[in-house]
Amino acid sequence: MKIILFGGTGMVGQGVLRECLLDPDVEKVLSIGRSRLKQVDAKIEEIIQRNLFDLSNLESRLVGYDACFFTLGVSAFGMAEADYTHLTYDLTLSIATMLARINPAMTFIYVSGAGTNSSESGRAMWARVKGRTENALLKLPFRKAYMFRPGFIQPLHGITSKTGWYRAIYAVLAPLSPLLNRFPGYVTTTEQVGRAMLAVAKKGYPKRVLESADVNATG
């Protein structure tokens, strides 16, 4: 299996990449992002692309992949809705639309978040934008597209978030990990998210939108 990974330097992306490298069924991971990965492995091909809104220069290199794991994202904290929409909906659909055109047999997996609002309404701005993004992705002509909505994600295996205040929260909650793991409907791990993505890409899943409990059961 050949996989394209967006967001490999983020916390979720690091976890997904780790599981891809451990999986004997994964032949290659093409990582595309603005910054360089920490990992070095024979399976990895890395492309540093400063402008992710325009991948036309890469089109010939993106053909022939089985799955795309899209873990790229930004925090909505302090952002105007127009700016968040541009970096969430516009960016994701720009990339996904191109991939659907050149790889129609691909499985596309998008990491959204618990609380995403499929009705595209409601009070939480980020939830509306994420819901709009999910709905648009599900209409694209991929072989299959799946939306992952994890809740609290516990980083494992030395993985850390790039966001300082996220790291502070995880440090405070680390001693409570055994307690948190009793709530699989709300809590998962970077390992389980990565394994679930691989399982869904290989075998599919009955639901197109996976909540934390689905991720944990699959991963």
Image: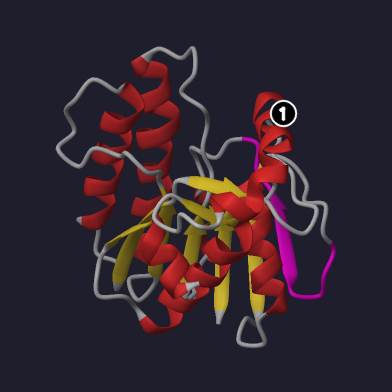
- Is the N terminus in the top left, top right, bottom left or bottom right quadrant? bottom right
Q: Residue at x 67, y 87 (%)?
A: 24
Residue 105 position (above or below residue 170): below
Q: Residue at x 65, y 45 (%)?
A: 176
Q: Looking at the image, which is closer to me, 169 or 8?
A: 169
Asked whether 199 falls inside the magenta stretch, the response is: no
Residue 109 position (above or below residue 124): below
Residue 185 appearing in the image: yes
Tell me residue 150's x, y (percent): 44, 51
Tell me residue 139's x, y (percent): 20, 56
Tell me residue 143's x, y (percent): 29, 73
Going by the numbered disc 1, the residue's amino acid type is: Ala
Q: Is residue 116 left or right of residue 66?
A: left
Magenta residues, as a range? 40-50
Please tell me how crowded label 1 is: few (under 14), some (14-19), or many (20+) other residues with Cα within 10 Å: few
Circle 1 sits on which residue?
168
Tell me residue 130's x, y (percent): 33, 37
Residue 10 appearing in the image: no
Name the outermost residue toward the bottom.
24
